[in-house]
Image (spheres, coloured by chain):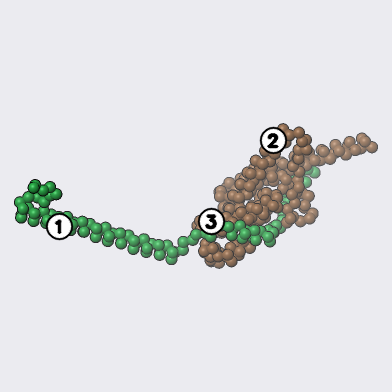
Amino acid sequence: MSNEAELIEQLKQGNEAAFKQIYQLYADRVFNTALSIMQHTQEAEDITQEVFVQVFRSISDFKEQASLFTWIYKVTVTKCADAQKKSRSQKRFAFVTSLFSSDDSLQHDTPHFEHPGIVIENKEHSKVLFYALQQLAPKQQLAFTLHKIEGLSYQQTADAMNTSLASVESLLFRANENLRSLLSDYYKNNVQTGASLLRSLLLML
Amino acid sequence: MKKDISHIVSKTMESIEGIKRAEASPFIYGKIMEQLKYLPAPVYYGTSMILRWATVMVILGVLNIITLKNVRTKSKTELSNQQGLDAMAQEYFGFQQSDKYNY
């Protein structure tokens, strides 16, 4: 803790070595959180970059009432929420423009994101899970990511999201319920599509 | 079939167990430093700096008070000189000193 206080003090004085040390301590955490939320490597890298630039610029505003860890997560969560809003509005705009364009090749979302930290045998299932995760409300997605993927405790998740412990518990409960329902729908549709495809193939034969 | 789907859903929910943290690209740090080059250094006022500023402000305040006091004393003296001159003019010439002369 005293080491962290020293680092903060040095960073406040613009010490580059202290900044590098803080970067090395938290870069992977920030990147992993951003990657799990955005599900896009380039966007996650951009967010990581923005977070650390913000940390460097705003360290004088850091009151040391919370830990540096929590503060960096807070900055990450805010940046991710902003990027998500932007990305969702862009998707909505693309959908609307596709309705009026002559091009019929409207791209449907499919499970595509592969988290690099997933074990090989779980890759296919995790793709579907990340796909379903994107359909959740932003706060539920955030709480689920911080707790289940990033491994933060309930309290740390609440601190990072600037909310209460009870609220996090409720968000996680709803996230789990909604994920189960989304996955169930997804597999029902897929099994039906697969079965009908098989039936039509058999008929052709 | 319902049982199968429920089983698959559970398996999917468990698929992130034991997930490892993704590592950030080693080039990000370089990009951040490049970006920071174009930003002004953070302004930090340490305790000693604040004390120095406070001392300077106190000295300035004291100097202001002293100057104000001097100015007031000086104007009072000037006023009394003027009054003295008027009294002398009254005594010698029997009239108030003024800029109007009767030729």
Q: Name the element at disc 1.
A: helix
Label 3 lies in what chain?
A: A
Tell me the green chain.
B
* Amino acid at pointer 3: Ser
Q: Nearer the viewer, residue A9 or A170?
A: A9
Tell me the brown chain.
A
Q: Which of A170 and A108 is in front in this view?
A: A108
Assess disc 1: are there few (<14), some (14-19) or many (≥20) residues with their C-alpha within 10 Å of its C-alpha: few
Q: Name the element at disc 2.
A: helix
Q: Which of B68 and A97 is in front in this view?
A: B68
Question: Are both tags, 2 and 3, on one chain?
Answer: yes
Residue indicated by mark 3: A58
* Amino acid at pointer 2: Val
| Residue at 52% in and 64% down | A13
Label 1 lies in what chain?
A: B
Where residue B94 appears, x then y in whole percent? Answer: 5, 51
Label 2 lies in what chain?
A: A
Disc 3 from disc 1: Cα separation: 62 Å
Residue indicated by mark 2: A96
Where residue A48 appears, x then y in whole percent? Answer: 64, 55
Assess disc 3: are there few (<14), some (14-19) or many (≥20) residues with their C-alpha within 10 Å of its C-alpha: few
| Residue at 67% in and 49% down | A37
Quadrant the C terminus of chain A occupies: top right
